Each structure stands twice: as C-alpha cells, then as structure tokens.
Amino acid sequence: MLLGRLKAHLSRPPALADYMVALGLAGVAVLFRSAMEAVTPGIVQFTTVFPAVVLAGVFCGTGPAVACAAAASISVAVIFGGGALLAWPPFNAAQVSVLAFLPACATVLWASSVMRRFAVDAAAAEARLAEVFRQIPGAAAILEAPAGRLLLRSAQSDSVLGQPERRVDRSSEMANYGGIHPDGRPFAADDYPIVRALKTGELINGEQIRFRRPNGDMADLEVYAGPVRAADGRVVASVGMAFDVSDKVEAARRLGESEARARATSERLRAALDAGALGLWELDLATERYRLDEVFAAMLGLPPQPVEMPRTELRRLIAPDHQERAIKTLMDAIATGSPYADEVCVITARNARRWLVTRGAVFADDRKVIGVVSDVTERREREEALQAALTARTTLMREADHRIKNSLQLVVALLRLQIGRVSDADAKAALGAAMTRVNAVADAHLALQQSPDLRSIDVDRMLADLCGRVGSLNPSVATNFDGPGGIWLDAEQAIPLGLIASELLTNALRHAFRPGVAGTVAVRTAVERGVLGLTVADQGVGLPTTPARPGLGTTIIETLARQIRATVTRQSQPGAGTTITLRMEMPDQPEPDVGLSDCSVRHSVHEPVEDS
C-alpha cells in the first residue's frame, strides 16, 4: 500500500494542497518539539522536525519538502535557539544543532528528489513495457521461475489461443491447453516451448504447433520462446510468443497443391506435345524475343535444344512469299487479342522447305503470345499429290463424258439418217422416239460435263435444255418451263429423272393435241419439305377413257421411277388436259458453289419441227 501511494504521489507534480500538507506536518513537528522540550530539556532541536521533512519529501514532492524544511528551520531557530545564535563563538550544543539542521534537510531533500526521479522513471518504463507487451500481435506471455507463474499476458492471447485470461500459478496447469502432436497426442505441460525455455533454458525459434481451441476450431501456431537470465546466468523467467499462421499454412498447402497440379499439367502437356510431335514457342512482346523448345528448334533445322532468338531472326526463316501475310496474321491477333492460327512455309537453317501449322493465344496482361507448332510438310505433299491426281482424274472424266456425248450425238445423227430412209410410219415413229431418248441421255451427259464436281447435275438447267430441244416436235404447241433453281441431284438420280421428263414431254407434244391445234405444255419443278416434284401438264384432249395396253414409253417411265424411288400420278379429264406428277425424296448433299443454283429458270419455246 505504501509503495502504491508512493507511486501515485511521485507520478504527479506538487499542488497547493501538497504545500499545505507539508506546512501542516512542519507545524505538528514544531508543536511536538515544544512538548518534548518541556518534558525532556536539551533534546536535539531537529530530531522531531526531521521526520516531518522526510514525510513532506516523500508524500508531497520536493517543492513542499523545501517549504517544510525552511519553515521548520526558521521556527526552531527562532523559538528554541534565537538567543544562542547571537553568541559567537564559541558554539554551544544548541547552536551546533541548529546549524546542522539545514545540511540535514538538504540531504534529505536531495535523497527524496533522487528517489522520486528513479521511481517515476521506473514506473514509466514498467508501464511502457506492459503496454508494448500487451500490444504484441500474437499470443505472448512471461512465466516466472521456478514454478512457472504467469506474470504477463498479451491482449491478443485470447483471440489466438481461444482461451480466456486466467491466472496460472504453475506451469503444470498449461496441460489444459490445446496443443496436439503430429501423431494426435495432446501436449503435456512440459511440451510447450515456453515451459521448455523456463526449465531447460532452450531457445525455440519458429516451431510449428497444431492447436485445438476450446470451441473445437483447429489452428496452426508458429511459436518462439526463450529464457530470461539473471546476471549470474540463472533462468529467472521465460518469454514466449505464438502467432496464428493458419492462413499462411493453408496458403502454403494450396500453393503446394497448385504447384503439384501445375507440374502434373506440365508433364501431361509435355507428353501430349511429344505424342503429337508439337513444338512450343513463346513470344515476349516487351523484349521482342522468341523462346523455342527443342522440338520447334529441330523443325527449323537448328540443334535440338531450347533456343532464344530475336523476333526479326525468326521472321527471316519464313519463306519470302509468306512473310507479309504471316506478319499481318500475327499482328492482327495481338491487336485484337483473338486466337492466333496460321500455316506458313519456312526455309530451315539447312535450306529445306517445310510447312508448319502454328496456333497460339495472346496474354495481354503478361505481354506474351504462347503457342504450339506442328510440321505438316508430309500432309501438304500428300495433299498436293492428291490435288494433282484429282485434277488429272477430272480432266480424264470430262474427256470421257465429252466422248460419250459425241458418241450419243453420232447415234442421234444415225437415227435421223435412218428415219429419212424409212417409209413406214410406225418405223419412223419408233426411230423418232429412240432418237428422242438418246438425245435425253446426251443432254444429261452434257449437264454432267458442265457440272463443277462431275457428280452433281443442275436439274433445272437440264430440264430447261430438254424443253428447248423437244419442244420443236409440235410447232403448234408452246413448251414452258418453270423452276425455282438451286436443285442439284447426283447423276444416278438426275439422268433417270431427265429420261422420265423426256418421255412425258414427248408424249404430251405428240398425243395431247390434235394436229394443227395450238396449245401449251407446262413443265414445273418444286421442292417442298425435302420432296422434289416434277409436273408435266397440258391442255389437250386428255387420256382415253379405255386404258390402252402399256407401250414402251410407259414401261420406261415406270422402270426408271422405281430406280430412283419416285412415285408417278396421273390426272386427266377428257377435253380438259392431263397432268402427270412425279415425286421423290431429295437426298442430303452439299450444293456446288457454281451454276444456276441461285436463280430460277423459266423457258418458253415454240419452234418449227426440224425437217427430217
């Protein structure tokens, strides 16, 4: 209690009340001295004043002590030794005691001032130490030897350890905390670093501890501990600090997993690149330099090892006729951030011409372009050889079709010549029908020859040419064709379809109208829901009511319809004309990019019959 009052008084400056207390103490001392003089004459004058000065210096500060000393000195000198002071020399006891009183008071005042200064400094230092210790950003504590009593604990200990602050009288009580060994055993008291530092003097630096808080949460602690030694080397205390590094440990774990995944991905990528014979390259846009792996370097005829080269040096390896386009493709990808893809021809360091396909991605934040490259020289050579073969095949097929067409035209010419030499009407009609059929086949081969792929035939163009040629069989009848355009069929379907149309149109021109009667035969094509429709309609006399025996033309139509899986329907009324419709499913196939696929075809012809 006395020490507490001493600290309280010495930690503040003197006030007016302190002077009043000091003077009061001096007055009490003087009265007590007067009473003692009456009882015991000759008592040393400052004997009773001295305690008052000490009390004034201790409890009231140096200023009140000076006032107290001065007042007491003057009072004693005047009251008890005033007359003796005038007797000089010799000195008597009273004189000596009065004269010695002032140095004694000065000594007491100096000692109290020094004690006050030391006490204030010590109290301030202790307060600063305690405040700094409590503000350590972690769990910190000081244990006192030998029992391990807890002297001081930081304010962060509660949040780090999850343990409420409580008094620890001995280190053995720390067994109740939540330290856990790697094998799952709980910590004993002596396992904690701060206890080991206290008992063995061990210095612990950054030891990792797994810790279970009272609420069950697990934490990772990084612990530091060390002993506090006296001048003779004895351990008098230990200091320990623990920091919650759970986030750091978790981040390190995730980083390790990420690095492991990155290594695995890198290994898989390398394996994939090796399996696909792919090279890897990287362009640093900041330094304008390429980094090539050993595979890409080998493709360029360089030693098979990673190499770094300026961008301009790699650019010179590109074939001159490819440089401008290759540079533009890469710059466009960098400017837009879009994926980069190109196929270029390079002249290797060994002066060999190679074809490379490269693909990459632009990483704008890192100022890099990263990609892969593959050597497709063998593929390009095969493609060029195949293209040459296809060109030769196309040429041969066109030549063959041209010869077939010429042969068919020769047959037509022979039939026409034979018609001129035959007098029998039935024979003439039969030869004319044969000539018409051969002409239909010739028209189909002509359309096939004009096809861009020698496989597909423009149906509307073929039918329009057919109407233009066959329409001359009856000069009194007009032949009209109407089609939407864009109908392409394989030759295996288009040629039978042309023959069927030739038979229908020939029959309409020859039999639908009486001789000399004008009329119209309309041929139309349409596609609806994947079904191709071909209609041949006339305004003639109609079909006979009594079915006649099927002729050759009817047999040809039915046979060819079955071949292309088409259905043929007839509608006829006497005197109102006949309409014959063919329907077949359109196959799924790409359209050639040329021809009349983008326009409709309409044809009207009314020509005189050729003189045979």
Image: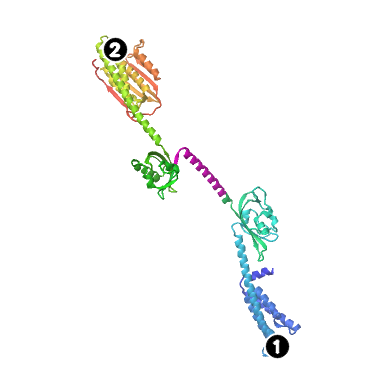
Viewer-closest of 6 and 22:
6
Circle 1 residue: 92
Q: Nearer the viewer, residue 571 or 481?
A: 481
Q: Is residue 486 left or right of residue 261?
A: left
Name the element at disc 1. Answer: loop
Residue 55: image x %, image y %?
68, 75
| Residue at the right extreme of this rendering | 39
Residue 258 belongs to the span the image colors magenta: yes
| Residue nearer the viewer, 236 or 170 | 236
Give the amino acid type for the residue marked by disc 2 in the picture.
Ala
Question: Which amino acid is tagged 1?
Answer: Asn
Q: Which residues are magenta?
A: 250-279
Residue 132 in the image, given as x and y percentages of width and height: 60, 62
Asked whether the residues under the numbered discs 1 and 2 touch, taking CB atoms below 8 Å apart as contact, a structural biologist would say: no
Rendered position, 457 above or below 137: above
On the image, the x and y values in percent for residue 290 come to: 41, 46
**Residue 323, how many percent across, how many down?**
35, 43
Q: Earlier in the sequence, mark 1 or mark 2?
A: 1
User: Which residue is denoted by mark 2 in the rendering?
Assistant: 429
Residue found farthest to the top? 424
Query: Relative to 84, does residue 464 appear above or below in the rendering?
Result: above
Alpha carbon of mark 1 to alpha carbon of mark 2: how far?
Answer: 185 Å
SS majority, magenta: helix
In this image, 560 relative to 191: left or right? left
Label 2 residue SS: helix
